[in-house]
Image (cartoon, coloured by chain):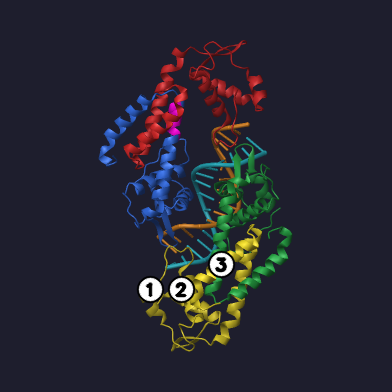
Chain colours: A green, B yellow, C red, D blue, E orange, F cyan
Amino acid sequence: MIVLDYRDKRPLYEQVCEKLTHLIVSGVLQPDEKLPSVRNLAMELSINPNTIQRAYAMLEQDGYIYVITGRGNFVAQPSAWQNEHLTSARQDLEDAITRACSDGLSRSDVLEVVERIYAKGRDNSND
Amino acid sequence: MIVLDYRDKRPLYEQVCEKLTHLIVSGVLQPDEKLPSVRNLAMELSINPNTIQRAYAMLEQDGYIYVITGRGNFVAQPSAWQNEHLTSARQDLEDAITRACSDGLSRSDVLEVVERIYAKGRDNSND
Amino acid sequence: MIVLDYRDKRPLYEQVCEKLTHLIVSGVLQPDEKLPSVRNLAMELSINPNTIQRAYAMLEQDGYIYVITGRGNFVAQPSAWQNEHLTSARQDLEDAITRACSDGLSRSDVLEVVERIYAKGRDNSND
Amino acid sequence: MIVLDYRDKRPLYEQVCEKLTHLIVSGVLQPDEKLPSVRNLAMELSINPNTIQRAYAMLEQDGYIYVITGRGNFVAQPSAWQNEHLTSARQDLEDAITRACSDGLSRSDVLEVVERIYAKGRDNSND
DNA sequence: GTGGTCTAGACCACC
DNA sequence: GTGGTCTAGACCACG
């Protein structure tokens, strides 16, 4: 379900968080679907339960999942995260393009990259 | 010459590195121009000389500057860094846009952001 | 009769307890009226009977209901709980307002909120 | 500086968090003032550094403090937290009064409590 | 010395 | 079985 990259400099809990967020946002995990339990996912990834716990806590805090103690963690309704997710993604993009601009990339360079990526990723139905 | 942002989460040496890179790439610092000495720049920014040392080491390692022992640090010829700089910037941009795409941003969302940034940043003469 | 909110962070037995308390205090459940049996209510809410059992135990302990072994649970006389209920509610309110005060809310802020809530909730006939 | 209440049901990190928030909001801790280090405060309170770490992480996440790795934790500018703090306090108050209303307290009951508390707490200069 | 991450293992409340 | 908290102790990057 998730593969960790130990060469990645980011903390493990952040990787887990990001991977799960993608699964949720992309709809692979449907609303109200149950996520693996803290202990199970920890075992599956061979990491400490506390690390998973932390990732789940962040996801809940960001509205991607909700928790029922004693039952498990469940995917939240899109209405709970959709807005925030898009604005945050937009902000990240803005930062990246600003950096690209100040790094000397020309507008046409950027546009070309955009076209290439969106042509390749059209199966995601993001037009 | 350089202003540090202590609220920035990144390590100081990375900030110094980035700021100097910008000055070099943008031509504010000309090829073969001498950079401030480690000690001087450290004093000016009121930070530890080790931090500057580390930043200079990275800049040399990335080909932006060259060192003449006993003389100082000097800006390298653009031919030494231009290619690498652009491809690295391009790669960063690609990653960011890929992420934006998989985060659900549409092509038109991205294009709009690009136009906005490049309209605002036209004084950088990157068209 | 009762609707549970699984998103609520509080334990289920506490929710059940609170809902029943409201029904009793507001007079929807009359003194000496029989409450649903543990098993029935558990089935109706699709939760574990232990949870209902615990809620009933708390209600009895707080004087809202009385138990006749083998017969069932019954709403107690208002004289048994009225005083305690009001002083406890008063105490909670006091704590909340003290916190609001120390959080920097002005007296007029608080008064405004009070008016708003009591204007909206006048159908509860608490003037 | 802080006293923990072990009878309190809330987690320790939340208590620490709340106490520090009060110290910050009330101005006892001034902007840009340094907070005790994670390890020091942990020793002082005789609890595990991780618990303090968690409290500090929450405070940063809520904008009450900012962190400079290797230097320490510092009180953020009021502009960073003032708005959110007040709206959150207002929300808490609203919930409490709604509960009081549905618990059968009359408007005059509530008003009386408000007056009593704000009369007592007038040295806090909250009018 | 500073914060940040991670592990290992324990205990608790809830269901 | 579930999540949540806490401890103890280790290691790392930064300055």
Disc 1 marks a residue whose amino acid type is Leu
Is B61 magenta? The answer is no
Label 3 Cα crowd, 10 Å radius (few <14 / some 14-19 / many 20+): some
Task: Give the quadrant of the C terminus of chain A.
Answer: bottom right
- Report which quarter residue C47 is drawn in: top right
Q: Are marks 3 and 1 in contact (CB under 8 Å)?
A: no
Residue corresponding to mark 1: B45
Q: Secondary structure at mark 1?
A: helix
Is A27 located above or below residue C111 in the figure? below
Residue range in magenta is: D95-101
Residue C103 coordinates in the image, percent (x, y): 36, 42
Q: Are marks 2 and 1 in contact (CB under 8 Å)?
A: yes
Residue D115 coordinates in the image, percent (x, y): 30, 31
Distance (Cα) linking label 3 and label 1? 27 Å
Is D97 magenta? The answer is yes
- Report which quarter residue B38 is drawn in: bottom left
